[in-house]
Amino acid sequence: MALLADRLAQQITDDSARHLARLGFRTPAICVSALMYLHRHGPSSLTDLAQAYGQQHQLVTLRIATLEEQGLAIRQPDPKDSRRRLILLTADGQDEAARLSLHLARMTRALDGLAAQLGADLSVLLQSAIDHLNRDPLSRRIDAMATE
């Protein structure tokens, strides 16, 4: 099951990347969520982004570095806490995010069409599976079978 979920994620990411490039977006598909988070929430720390998406700091750091390389984001010291650095979008990043907002609405409708074809919303099913496994991990489920 994990392999299939990974293949699905990769297929969606690859197809999205080709589509975004064809439309002239600079943001790599794997960085869209970080760009849109910064667009919606304003200056944020790596910790904010990692917590919002349940991802490791290292992964978020790589994605932010990519946005910086593309000229879409910058880091600057937090005026309230000199130990923290905030990430914010550049003017180009704001423009890209505004354009992406329109595209993401179309992508959502396309995925809704897929859900209708499947007779199930994969996002809801995947989140439900994650929630169930957080409450009762697979290892505990397997161990329980050993005592049967």
Image (cartoon, rainbow, N blue to C red):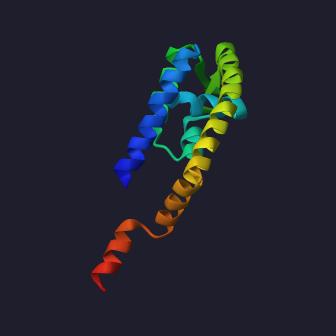
In depth, the one of 76 and 56 nearer the eye is 56
Q: How many marks?
A: 0
Is 104 drawn above or below residue 126 in the view shown? above
Name the residue located 69 percent from the left edge and 20 percent from the top edge. 99
Judge whether residue 85 can be spotted in this image. no
Name the residue located 60 percent from the left edge and 40 percent from the top edge. 111
Q: Quadrant of the N terminus?
A: bottom left
Q: Residue furthest bottom?
A: 148
In depth, the one of 83 and 110 nearer the eye is 110
Percent across and percent down for residue 127 are: 55, 55
* Quarter-of-image position of residue 49: top right
Left or right relative to 10: residue 85: right
Name the residue located 52 percent from the left edge and 17 percent from the top edge. 21
Is 123 drawn above or below residue 76 in the view shown? below
Name the residue located 38 percent from the left edge and 73 percent from the top edge. 141
Percent across and percent down for residue 66 are: 48, 22
In depth, the one of 127 and 71 nearer the eye is 127
Q: Residue furthest left?
A: 146
Percent across and percent down for residue 130 are: 50, 58
Percent across and percent down for residue 63 are: 49, 28
